[in-house]
Image (cartoon, rainbow, N blue to C red):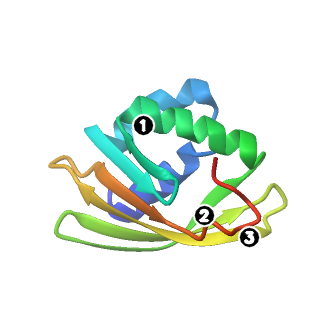
Amino acid sequence: MDAEELWSRYAAIWSSDPARRDSELKECLADDASYCDPNGPLRGRAALSDYMTGFQQSVPGGRFRITQVIAHNGRSLARWALQNVDGAVLQLGASFAHHDAEGRLKEISGFFPLTSSAPMA
């Protein structure tokens, strides 16, 4: 899967059913994946899955839409828009990642303002 498909699939996990989340995370994230955003760092798929649960509780119906992906040499940058259930944009941000040898996201860093009206978790 190319970087744009990967980021779009990963973005969909944030609002997916928790029963489906683990299998999707295995497809999109390296075994030793890490995640960091302004709220702090996380290690491993289970920690990120728990964080996604918090996101779903704090932004009911929230979804990420990938607006741009730039990729090269095992790295990628995705710009995204967080939308509410009606499609209104709540927040804009970007995420950067290093990829593993299989192309999955390995080290993800998310960038967004903490002063948004839609807290992440």
Question: In the displayed image of the protein, which residue is found farthest to the right?
Answer: 86
Q: Is residue 30 visible?
A: no
Query: In the image, is 59 to the left or to the right of 10?
Result: right
Of 24 and 94, which appears nearest the observer?
94
CB atoms of marks 1 and 2 within 8 Å: no
Question: In the displayed image of the protein, which residue is found farthest to the top?
Answer: 19
Give the residue at mark 1: 25
Query: In the image, is 17 to the left or to the right of 83?
Result: left
Q: Residue at x 73, y 45 (%)?
A: 58
Q: Secondary structure at mark 3?
A: strand
Give the residue at mark 3: 89
Q: Residue at x 77, y 48 (%)?
A: 61
> Residue 11, percent across and down?
53, 53
> Residue 113, percent across and down?
59, 71
Distance, label 3 to label 1, CA atoms, is: 25 Å
Q: Earlier in the sequence, mark 3 or mark 2?
A: 2
Which of labels 3 and 2 is toward the front? 3
Distance, label 3 to label 2, CA atoms, is: 9 Å
Give the residue at mark 2: 65
Q: How many marks?
A: 3
Q: Earlier in the sequence, mark 3 or mark 1?
A: 1
Q: Earlier in the sequence, mark 1 or mark 2?
A: 1
